Image (cartoon, coloured by chain):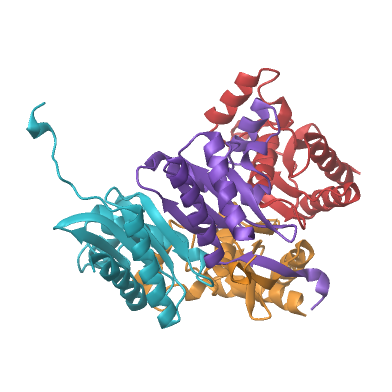
Chain colours: A orange, B red, C purple, D cyan
Amino acid sequence: MDEAFISRNHVRLSCKGAHVVVHAAEKKAAAMGVPQCIAVVDDGGNLLAFSRMDSARIGSIEIALTKARTAAIRRQRSEQVGGEDAQTKLRIAMASRLALTPMAGGIPIVVDGEVIGGVGVSSGTAEQDVECGEAGIAALLG
Amino acid sequence: MDEAFISRNHVRLSCKGAHVVVHAAEKKAAAMGVPQCIAVVDDGGNLLAFSRMDSARIGSIEIALTKARTAAIRRQRSEQVGGEDAQTKLRIAMASRLALTPMAGGIPIVVDGEVIGGVGVSSGTAEQDVECGEAGIAALLG
Amino acid sequence: MDEAFISRNHVRLSCKGAHVVVHAAEKKAAAMGVPQCIAVVDDGGNLLAFSRMDSARIGSIEIALTKARTAAIRRQRSEQVGGEDAQTKLRIAMASRLALTPMAGGIPIVVDGEVIGGVGVSSGTAEQDVECGEAGIAALLG
Amino acid sequence: MDEAFISRNHVRLSCKGAHVVVHAAEKKAAAMGVPQCIAVVDDGGNLLAFSRMDSARIGSIEIALTKARTAAIRRQRSEQVGGEDAQTKLRIAMASRLALTPMAGGIPIVVDGEVIGGVGVSSGTAEQDVECGEAGIAALLG
């Protein structure tokens, strides 16, 4: 086979790694007193691990999933989608048929310069969601 | 307020309980050498915890979610949906707009005679999926 | 970072490789006189390349996409989904909320024992669809 | 049959023509160093050809498809949808149930004054997306 037909040496997030992210995010959320929904997806946007903490909003489940997917398949923090312009943010969300969201709380997981997944957190304020997601990734990257 | 307007003393599955189910199901799956997708939902069919083990099929994520939801909101094991008749099984799946499935591997979580949630397992054979789900519930109920 | 949190050395299908599959499938289809829709997705089920040949059915676009996705994320030929039992085949399609199909014409692309994507072909008979997909993969693997 | 019941002599984009657009857009994108998702649809908005270049975002697949569809079935450049008013742009996107987008990067393919299809490009800036789409159409129109 012609080597141009493939690329090699890609890194993949393991189930264990995904749960480390979820649990560290949960720990941070508990310390903050803010129950959260936390989702971790792989680089293709497919779900790896999820947790809805006691008292977290049911309405935040889908949002956490969408934030995680956005970070992974857009390869940027979800709040950066569409830059600074509010209209552009809405247009990207709609043009993606709601697969992407510009809401803060989705963070790509980067190893060796490659996005291998994303974490999405939802139920708190934008700052709280981001802080929990970052705590999750910090625990992973050690 | 008239007490007839509400009902009291309901049991609810906690986030911790949901993860106990997921992790025990994972442990059984690992012992069987069958990587699985495992979902746990509450009594409203809303996601509490999820795990996709290394090498489990991405195509099984949605199936595990559907099985768990079926068990919880139909309040029966998923393979019992529609009884023995194949046509009835399909018709229920379709009439529910694919929220419900008659595939084995969804098991209600029952405490004090009340369904408080459901577990759904997918990636193995029907028997393997059920065995993992039962191991998860057994760990919960102690 | 703990190495258990990731896995390494995964292979990824390139854009060039995906088009080799599409074009070889088209060539076979042309030789058979059967215009086809041909889709190639990566290991996460996300679209890489697509072609609808002149006179191929518009109604086959979605089917080709679903077959390709099925082969990739189920990691088996689409006609093998659900084994031999017609009811099981329908149940899996529905439990996946129509992400998966048991129709012949979806074939996983395997390199070094790992599924790196899938091709889906639709517009002809089951045999014709499979033959075109196989021709596409044969051209890739050389 | 009454000739008023039909219209004749319509032009249709061929599969070969669609791939010429895709490949010329890819070539421009490569020259710019911006990996892109590129979709070409016919006058009915139905997919003809697609390519996701190496390193283009998975999150741009759906956006490229939506831009191409918009240009073809709205018969105008996607950024012209809704004119200059931001609210009108959003309302059209929503009223179409997200089939249409006002994001730049969708360009109608016009032959003999008739729209015979559309190209949609996504992953770069608005200017880069448009430039790649225009390069694709220029190669087609010669």
Residue B101 seen in the current view: no
From the viewer's side, name the closer residue of D75 and D6: D6
* Identity of the residue drawn at 75% across and 74% down: A140
Q: Position of residue A28 (x, y in %)?
A: 72, 72
Quadrant of residue B70 within the rendered picture: top right
User: Is residue A90 shown above or below B12?
Assistant: below
User: Is residue B37 shown above or below D106?
Assistant: above
* Identity of the residue drawn at 22% across and 67% down: D85
Q: How many marks?
A: 0
Horizontally, residue D133 falls left or right of residue B71, namely left
Horizontally, residue A55 falls left or right of residue C51, namely right
From the viewer's side, name the closer residue of D73 and B15: D73
Q: Position of residue C46 (x, y in %)?
A: 55, 57
* Identity of the residue drawn at 55% across and 72% down: A75
**Outermost residue toward the front in this view:** C31
From the image, which quarter does the C terminus of chain D lie in?
bottom left
From the viewer's side, name the closer residue of C111 and C128: C128
Q: Position of residue D105 (x, y in %)?
A: 33, 68
Q: Position of residue D13 (x, y in %)?
A: 28, 53
Residue D73 seen in the current view: yes
* Identity of the residue drawn at 50% across and 47% down: C28
From the image, which quarter does the N terminus of chain D lie in?
top left
